[in-house]
Amino acid sequence: MLKAFYHLLIRDLRLALRNRHELANPLIFFILVVTLFPLAVMPTPEALQTMAPGVIWVSALLAVLLSLDRIFKQDYEDGSLDQLMLSPNPLVILVLAKVLAHWLLTGLPLVIIAPLLGLFMSLSAEAVEVLVYSLLLGTPVLSLVGAIGVSLTVSVNHGGVLLSLIILPLYIPILIFGANAVDVASSGLPVTGQLLFLSAVLALALSLAPLASSVALRITASR
Amino acid sequence: MWNWIQRFSSPKHFYSMSVPLIKWFAIAALVIGLYGLYLGLFVAPTDYKQGDSYRIIFIHVPAAWLAMFIYMVMAVSAGIGIIWRIRLADMVAAASAPIGASFTFLALVTGSLWGKPMWGTYWIWDARLTSMLILLFLYLGYMALQSAIDDQRSADKASGLLAIVGAVNIPIIHYSVEWWNTLHQGASVAKFDAPSIHIDMLIPLLLMAVAFKLFYATMVLVRTRNESLYRDRNRRWVREIVEKL
């Protein structure tokens, strides 16, 4: 079981690394969207500072959303998803491996590049630190919950807009607490509560989302 | 027991059984609703601070309660449909979604009409307003997924799963939004000690809530009947009904 998990994870990572330009796209998108905001409003440090948590978090959310297809789409199209479902290993474990691969390829790069964007938006050092922590706890949840949406819509033609329609409302708690943590940190207040909430949601998503996602895949496969 | 449930929940049986139910639910909704409106609009005392404009709560609050209630009905019946493969439950879930979305919309509109004279603005990013708006999006997402998948059974299962995921999320969304920002007055009725609302206002409010629920029961039965006719349009029992017309 662990072996299957490991092999699937390695396979997904290897497939993605052979297609490097596609790998960088969500990251570039993230940086680009954040860059748009100072251009659209007056780029005074004070204004940027108040906007920064929201702007960075919303952009991260959209970057993850646009890359969600990657989890199952290709495997669905070439039939390897059916093979995964036929394998004797529990589908939940395999889904978890695919989600982890997705997070390592999109979520983690966003976390790593975030301090640079914090710098762009003139965030204080403490706020940047909290930004990294909040993204580190929040982006896995985005991948986990997003996997449910992709499993439901992977067989639908032009499912992109549909996917955002059904997934974005579910992302709202993460957005609220992630952005709020950074906001509070930039005023120099303690953020333990927000980070603990994000961790709790992560634990919940980690235990329930792969289950829902594998049920959804079985529904998709049965049509 | 199982056979009984199976037979009872067959669309054909439901179709003939629901006729008297619809009639009585509709009559009860009308009578209780009219009486509740009369008490609310003419008998209930004027609020000392808000004047007469508070009377919109007799529509607003029941609509908001019903909107949340319908989502729960939808998620539960979708769960029954997925677990026990009862087609009627899937139909109830599918029939409930547009009604729920309408009541969510009604709650938002009446709330914002009330908000203008009271808070001085039609819209404010307050916790409960935002939760209701998100609830509307959840309904719309459910309906979008339902209509995007051609095969009826997998459309039911997929959107049903989404409804259940949404139901797990609703408390999380509710409390995170609550924590985030609050301007809306706290709950006045659902408190464990004495409700902080005058009894002459409470009675019409509860009557209206009951009337709204009965109206929903009527509507969901009518819509489920239509849904079962449409889905079984190639089956014999529907043909027999059509031929009798």
Image: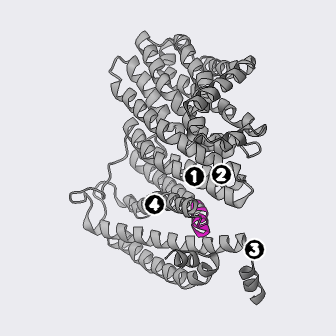
Which residue range is magenta in the image? Answer: B86-97
Q: Which residue is mark 1?
A: B161
* Position above or below: B235 against A81: below
Crowd tier of the residue under label 2, counting other residues whose Cα lies within 10 Å: few below 14, some 14–19, many 20 or above: many
Whichever of callouts 4 and 1 sits on the residue coming sooner in the sequence is: 4
Which element type, helix, strand or loop, lies under badge 4?
helix
| CA separation in Å, label 2 and label 1 | 9 Å
Nearer the observer, B213 or A201: A201
Position in image of residue B36 (x %, y %) = 39, 73
Pointers 2 and 1 in contact (C-beta within 8 Å): yes
Q: Are marks 4 and 1 on the same chain?
A: yes
**Circle number at residue B69:** 4
Which element type, helix, strand or loop, lies under badge 1?
helix
Residue A63 visible in this rendered orientation of the protein: no
Crowd tier of the residue under label 1, counting other residues whose Cα lies within 10 Å: few below 14, some 14–19, many 20 or above: many
Taking the magenta stretch, the answer to whether it contains residue B94 is: yes
Which residue extends farthest bottom? B244
**Circle number at residue A219:** 2
Q: Chain of mark 3?
A: B
The residue type indicated by label 2 comes to Ile
Q: In the rendered view of the protein, which quadrant contains the N terminus of chain A?
A: top right
- Mark in front: 3 vs 4: 3
| CA separation in Å, label 4 and label 1 | 18 Å
Position in image of residue A26 (x %, y %) = 66, 23
